[in-house]
Structure formats: structure tokens, C-alpha cells
Amino acid sequence: MNRILSSSVLRGTIAASVLAISLLFAASTPLRADDDCQKRIAHADHKLHEAAAHHGWDSPEAAKYRAELNEARSYCWEHNHRWWSEDDHKWHTEHDWDDHDHDHDNH
């Protein structure tokens, strides 16, 4: 009887552990995707501001990073249905960015 009880307890403990680990990984995946999107958008925004400072807002270099910023926003929107605004440091859940918001420095 003890052997049966021990075996059942062991199986229950293993099942609970597997479930807990699965939930832990499932919960961390969206957070990691958000972090990647935030970093990708922040990097593109930073590169755009650097290019504009060194070459001007109408330069080919700024245009390259402006396109990269728009691609990063689109990617995040398509995969997470939200995007990071580096200017106001918050997530947006609406597709409300302006593709031309970085055409000229408004700051």
C-alpha cells in the first residue's frame, strides 16, 4: 500500500512540476517578445536621431533609419498588436503611429 501511495504522490509531484514549468515558460515568452520589440524600435529611433544630427533630417541616412523605424513598428504591431513609442516611453495598443512623425525634428 505504501508503495502505491508513494508512486501516486511521485507522479502527482512530477505532473505538477511539469505544469508549473510549462506555465512559467508560456508566461515569459510574450514579455521577451515585448522586450525585443521595444529594443528594436528604440535602436531604430536612436539611429534615426543620430543620422539626422550628423547628416540632416532630409539625408539618405536619415531616410534609411526612418524606414527601419517604420519596419520595426510594423513588425511589433503584426506580432504583438502593440508598438513601443520611444518618444513618450509607453506601449500603444492602437495602430496610431504617424509614418512621418520623424520627418523633421519636432523636439
Image (tube, rainbow, N blue to C red):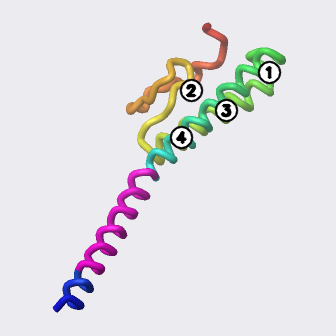
Precedes in sequence: disc 2 or disc 3? 3
User: Disc 4 versus disc 3: distance between alpha carbons?
Assistant: 12 Å
The residue that mark 3 highlights is 43
The correct choice, above or below, for 25 with respect to 57 in the image is below
Specify start and end residues of the magenta stretch as a single range.
9-28
Precedes in sequence: disc 1 or disc 3? 3
User: Disc 4 versus disc 2: distance between alpha carbons?
Assistant: 22 Å
User: Disc 4 versus disc 1: distance between alpha carbons?
Assistant: 30 Å
Precedes in sequence: disc 1 or disc 2? 1
At label 4, the amino acid type is: Asp
Residue 77 position within the rendered picture, expressed as x and y whole percent measured from the top left: 47, 40
User: Disc 2 versus disc 3: distance between alpha carbons?
Assistant: 17 Å
Residue 6 position within the rendered picture, expressed as x and y whole percent measured from the top left: 25, 83
Quadrant in the picture for residue 12: bottom left
The residue that mark 4 highlights is 35
Tag 1's secondary structure? loop
At label 2, the amino acid type is: Asp
Precedes in sequence: disc 4 or disc 1? 4
10 Å neighbourhood of mark 2: few (<14), some, or many (≥20)? few
